[in-house]
Amino acid sequence: MASTALPPALATRSIPFSFSGHRRLIYSPAGFGPKSIGGPNRFFHPFRLPYRLPSVASERQIKDPVSEEGCQDALGSTVYDASTIASNILYHAELTPSFSAGHLHLPKAYFATAESVRDELMKNWNATSSYYEKLNMKQAYYLSMEFLQGRALLNAIGNLDLTGQYAEALRKLGHKLENLAGQEPDAALGNGGLGRLASCFLDSLATLNYPAWGYGLRYKYGLFQQTITKDGQEEVAESWLEIGNPWEVVRHDVSYPVRFYGKVVLGSDGRKHWIGGENIKAIAYDVPIPGFKTKTTLNLRLWSTKVPAKDFDLEAFNAGKHNQANEAHANAEKICYVLYPGDESAEGKILRLKQQYTLCSASLQDIIASFERRSGNSVNWKEFPSKIAVQMNDTHPTLCIPELMRILIDLKGLSWKEAWSITQSTVAYTNHTVLPEALEKWNLELLQKLLPRHVEIIEEIDHELINNIISEFGIQDLSMLEQKLRDMRILDNVDFPDSVVELFSRAKAISEVKSKKKLLVKSLELTTDEASENSETMDVAEEVSDVAKSEGQLEEDEDSTSADLSWLKSSPKLQRVVRMANLCVVGGHAVNGVAEIHSDIVKKDVFNSFYRLWPDKFQNKTNGVTPRRWIRFCNPELSKIITKWIGTEEWVVKTENLEELKKHADNEDLHMEWRAAKTSNKMKVVSLVREKTGYIISPDAMFDIQVKRIHEYKRQLLNILGIIYRYKKMKEMSAQERISSFIPRVCIFGGKAFATYVQAKRIVKLITDVGATINHDPDIGDLLKVVFVPDYNVSIAEILIPASELSQHISTAGMEASGTSNMKFAMNGCILIGTLDGANVEIRQEVGEENFFLFGAQAHEIADLRKERAEGKFVPDPRFEEVKKYVRSGVFGPYNYDELMRSLEGNEGYGRADYFLVGKDFPDYLKCQDKVDEAYRDQKASLSSLSILQVHTYFHAHYIFTFSLFFMKEIYPKEIIISWLSKSLSQQRWTRMSILNTAGSHKFSSDRTIHEYARDIWSIQPVPLP
């Protein structure tokens, strides 16, 4: 780290100052002596270096760290022992306080600890940035509307390999690390898989030493905080920033102007100028992203929006027009208030579009400023793609394409051809969905009003695309060309250029003339006077040919066929829109799906016409998750077992080592340890569920978990209907029949339904109503529990996933792009039940078909099944009809679920006809669940004949119990001990499946995915810090 020149006043002297038994250097300006920290001193300004100060607890002689020599020594001789860390925590508690002086209570201790950790990160963070500036190598920039980070404290100290030291330091201060970590709110910067994937990618990029940055928005209130009431889901604003965020650093010197509205004028320099309108500033907030046991610490830059103080209308305020006075500030700040604001209103649509453009504009201005700074006095724009790679995470950052064009052409003076070549070579696009409603389309008039210059650029790109399509496919097959233009055009329901209309009119006329000619020639029959007739036929053919050459006749044919060419003109009944996904495909050099089956659908269906035109653009990059957060840190018990049996901890960064577990899959010692870890994790969930819901669940039951965003295609409805059917059958049995027929299950749900998604909120309501009924039914007891954990987030996932035994990934085949929670569950030894959808296909291949519970229709069957339904040929299973009737009976409360049930009925219509095939897959789902029960109860051996001595010997040999045989005999009856041990050994088959799931999950590390992006799309190399 380069030394920083200090003000003379600060460099004159240093004095030791003591508090709470710890000593720190406090710098006092010349002319002022030491002051009591508790007393007033308006001249006292403690200077804190951007790294952790060394401990001065002893009386040994130290160098003044303000001097250059002392500064270098401080950087090079950091001691990471518990006492030093404790001293540093106290330093922050007293000298960088967010709370009042006095008792080191939990919130205060958390903030001080986080600031202490940030000191450690800061050194590597600054060093990484400086090293990249010096090398000026190619760097990747990942733009995403979401980064679902989760808590940072445990992840940061884990990556720094200081978990033990911090735990001990906090113990010295009277706190437990896990209690302290619980004080940290989850960063409300994302919602689901899209944001969590982005965060996993940043972790892998840092761990693998790839030069990269992330860009996003700093949402003040997140998506929403979910609460569950008697009425179902309710939403309140997230409060994660209310007391500050110790992990972020605001960069007051890094801000960029962002413009909306206004108009485009042609300047005297011949360039287009976008002027006027509404202007805001995007301010940078940086968050460090440390790699695992590496110096590399990358940057996540989040933008917040504001306007300068001068835009506050003081005159209006003093006149009592307070809202008017603050209007500019309110309009700017609300851009970063909420993730995915409701867009049913025009105002909501404008706000979403402003968010997307702010992300793109501020980020690209920052990237370009970095490129120009690193280039020095010799900026060569042709080198831009060799230094910069921009990855658009889904369609939200699509405006990067016209914005980069605008900056290069209007501000940097490049030609269209040069700018387009640079843009296409720089930008790449990841597609995350095949759902039509998720492929963004923006109203053209709205976009034109808000971003007029960008619409001009998009129109020109669209025009060039049309010419390219016609050039590539020709006009021989007009029907095929029409279909290509309909599929591929960026602007939809927008008039085609006059030249294209004329081309089609002429081509249509010529085609019809040729058809008439063939028809006439065919219809003529030779008579006995063949020569005469033959001559007549030739005359007709020549006449037709002459007609085809006649301009007047062509014009007449154009008029007569205008009805057939109506698709070339816009319809006033439909919106004119910009298809953002098409713009992404056209404007980038690479398009990737996120699972093998998804990438195939992208090529064969979603973007088939583009794929046929540019096959080399399309790739697959199967998603992955970071094994650091998702095994090593969230499941330390299992991690220790894996390391012990593999013989190395290298699996944390080289997950292919997990395959070594296959060699031990039948080892009984491993089985016992594996089950013990699972039981320990289940006890944590018991506490979590009681805290969040008040329900008491049994750790002896199977934990069956489905946690993900609530959506009809993810089919939480199929899951809860299966549970309802199970409950109904239980109620029809005697107590003994229930026990013999069903294994105990705790069915856990979690996830948020978007505030405006009515049907999804009905599903949440049904789940909670079913839980309230079953959980209070004395006939059922612990045989079945249904729990909805409110406000599901990363921190809750880190508790649920390690404890899971069965996880449901049951989306309609072909509709889930990939999924990443399935990977996390498999890594933690959870067995999946699911369809052949998304990454399920590859997970099943890797873990083994026998270790995955498969059911349901396959992706290639879905279209025909929907057609069958539309034709009225589908016959629902009687059990499906039975369970719907049971829901409607009112057994789960007074709420009217008729609308929800009707979505599963009928043959056609919006919100009807069971579009997601719940009824079709229901019988196969029940059958598969029977297989789950069978596998879970499958016993290896009966232990009823074991003596108490054999029981004790078995436990002792496996280090399960440390108490004596006498203690066991006195406290526990023989039958209870044998029953416990029987349960422990009854699941050898299940445990083996669990081990093989972890062993087979190695492919699904985000490290593998990032290596592929770096190699195939970004063309970047690892850059380890020296």
Image (cartoon, rainbow, N blue to C red):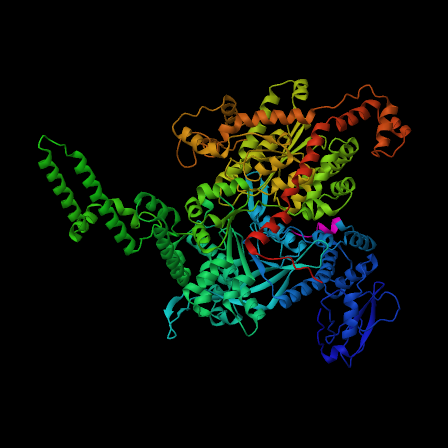
Is 766 placed above or below 1021 here?
above
Is 590 placed above or below 538 here?
below
* Left or right position of 994 against 272: right
Is 796 placed above or below 810 here?
below
Name the image quarter holding residue 666: top right
Name the image quarter holding residue 710: top right
> Horizontal and vertical percent for residue 711?
52, 40
Along the viewing direction, whichever of 339 and 508 lies nearer the viewer: 508
* Left or right position of 385 against 106: left
Q: Is residue 354 visible?
A: no
Looking at the rendered structure, the number of numbered marks drawn on it comes to: 0
Along the viewing direction, whichever of 676 and 641 lies nearer the viewer: 641
Name the image quarter holding residue 4: bottom right
Q: Is residue 428 visible?
A: yes
Say which quadrant the C terminus sits in.
Answer: bottom right
Say which quadrant the N terminus sits in.
Answer: bottom right
Is 901 placed above or below 335 here?
above
> Horizontal and vertical percent for residue 47?
73, 71
Along the viewing direction, whichever of 97 and 634 lies nearer the viewer: 634
What residue occupies the far front of the structure in this picture? 531
Q: Is 184 part of what is drawn in magenta?
A: yes
What residue occupies the far bottom of the structure in this picture? 31
> Horizontal and vertical percent for residue 789?
63, 40
> Horizontal and vertical percent for residue 501?
27, 52
Along the viewing direction, whichever of 274 and 601 lies nearer the viewer: 601
Q: Which residues are drawn in magenta?
A: 178-185
Q: Is 943 part of what is drawn in magenta?
A: no
* Left or right position of 920 against 6: left
